[in-house]
Structures are given as C-alpha cells and as structure tokens.
C-alpha cells in the first residue's frame, strides 16, 4: 500500500522569497510521485511528476521537486514565488499497475505581497 | 480540446435523498476516476471505470456507485445521503488509466452539500 504525508497544512511566504513544500511517502513497491496544484474553485492540475530517470524534475512555471529514495521524500521547491502561485498543492503517489493516485492532505501556499 | 466537464457544479440535498453526478471526459479518453475531497480526509479514491467496466474501487460503502457509458461519460450515484457525504467530488480522465503511465486530467468538481 502507498501513502503520502504532507507535513505542513499551510505555508505563508513573501513574494519573491523561496519556498519548499514537504512531502514524504510510504510504499512497499516502486513508486511514482506527483505534485498537483488546485487553484480556488478549480480542479487539480498536474504540476510535475517523477516516473524514473533523473531524480530532479521541473515544471514549466519554475517549480522543481527531487525524488530522494533514502529519505522517502519528494519535496517541492521554487526559488522565487509570485502572487499567482497562491493555491493548494497536493503530493500524490502510485505504484506499478495501480489505476489510482493516493493523495496527501494538501498544503495551502499563500504568497504575501 | 475541451477539458473534463462535471455537472452540476453545485448541489444541495437533504439527508436520506440520493444524488447523481455526471462527468464527461476529454474526447478520446477511456478511463474515468472519481475522488472525494473533504477538509478532514483530503482526496480519497472512489472508483475507476474503463470501457464501461469498474476496474478499481476505493474503500467506500456500497451507497456509492457508478457507471460508465459507451461514450466514456460516467455517472456517480450516492444513495441515502448522510451529512458526512458533503464534499467536493472530482472526476479525472485519462487515455487508458494506469495512474503512472497516463496523466490524469481533473474536472472542476461538483460541490455537494447535504443538509
């Protein structure tokens, strides 16, 4: 079985400051990891994913996440946040052959002007 | 290409009633998954349909059911509603399912309130 823990329910950060949203996973099989973002009154959008290969994955809007197998983590980072990054971020995991995602409880990122 | 659409966007029901939610996947997608999102439990997987067959089911009571039609549109039904069923119900579509091989595209959700 797979599970995800997002350690911070809320993260306030000033505009142009760096941010890290933490995600730890638990799994007995090979894992595939995802970050989704949910803007107010919208569905989830895929931000980035790790399937295999390079442990550092990037999104088109400046976010990146690093798969760390020894620490069972997949933290999301951005060196400089914008107001438009204010949203809820969900980490998710799945395993080989699975048809569904297991989500964390989410981290609400609030960017302060 | 149109995204995943869900109807209705908002619903208010009373305890004991039943409700049907609808999801139209992206054209060409054959897999539809349903998730329940609540503040306390977060996002939880309900079930997944592929080519009109339920392939996978989460840990929800039998009051929660679904089906998929030949055009891949899916409906979810909740019978005998309880207060705890109040949630945002999200639908996701993908080409073939397989959460790690296919990207899942989510709809905006249906906000269900049970009074």
Image (spheres, grey):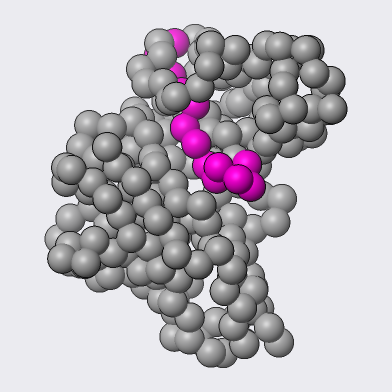
Can residue A43 be seen here? The reply is yes
Q: Quadrant of residue B65?
A: top right
- Residue at horizontal 23 percent and vertical 52 percent from the top: A51
Is residue B52 depicted above or below A20 in this figure? above
Q: Quadrant of the N terminus of chain B?
A: top right
**Residue A99 image position (x, y, % from top left):** 33, 31
Can residue B50 be seen here? The reply is no
Magenta: main secondary structure equals strand
**Residue B70 image position (x, y, % from top left):** 49, 9
Q: Nearer the viewer, residue B97 or A66?
A: A66
Q: Nearer the viewer, residue A16 or B87?
A: B87
Is residue B9 depicted above or below A113 in this figure? above
Q: Quadrant of residue B6?
A: top right
Is residue B75 depicted above or below A21 in this figure? above
Q: Nearer the viewer, residue B40 or A15?
A: B40
- Residue at horizontal 31 percent and vertical 64 percent from the top: A74
- Residue at horizontal 55 percent and vertical 45 percent from the top: B42
**Residue A100 image position (x, y, % from top left):** 37, 34
Task: Assess whether residue A30 is covered by the magenta stretch.
Answer: no
Q: Is residue B58 left or right of residue B15?
A: left
Number of numbered discs overlaid on the protein picture: 0
- Residue at horizontal 64 percent and vertical 58 percent from the top: A39
Q: Quadrant of the C terminus of chain B?
A: top right
Question: Where are the magenta residues, as a range?
Answer: B38-52
Task: Assess whether residue B40 is covered by the magenta stretch.
Answer: yes
**Residue B63 image position (x, y, % from top left):** 60, 12
């Amino acid at each position: 079985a797979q599970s995800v823990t997002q350690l911070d329910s809320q993260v306030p950060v000033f505009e142009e400051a760096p941010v890290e949203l933490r995600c730890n996973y638990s799994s007995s099989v090979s894992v595939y990891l995802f970050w989704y973002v949910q803007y107010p009154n919208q569905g989830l959008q895929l931000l980035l994913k790790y399937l295999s290969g390079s442990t550092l994955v990037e999104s088109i809007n400046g976010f990146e996440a690093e798969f760390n197998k020894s620490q069972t983590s997949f933290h999301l980072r951005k060196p400089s946040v914008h107001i438009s990054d204010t949203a809820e971020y969900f980490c998710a995991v799945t395993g080989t052959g699975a048809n569904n995602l297991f989500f964390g409880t989410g981290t609400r990122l609030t960017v302060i002007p | 290409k149109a995204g995943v659409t869900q109807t209705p966007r908002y619903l208010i029901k009373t305890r004991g009633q039943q409700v049907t939610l609808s999801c139209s996947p992206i054209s060409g997608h054959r897999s539809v998954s349903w998730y329940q999102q609540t503040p306390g439990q977060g996002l939880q997987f309900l079930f997944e349909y592929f080519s009109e067959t339920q392939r996978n089911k989460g840990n929800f009571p039998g009051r929660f059911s679904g089906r998929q039609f030949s055009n891949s549109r899916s409906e979810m039904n909740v019978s005998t509603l309880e207060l705890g069923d109040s949630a945002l119900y999200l639908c996701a579509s993908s080409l073939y399912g397989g959460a790690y091989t296919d990207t899942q595209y989510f709809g905006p959700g249906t906000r269900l309130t049970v009074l």
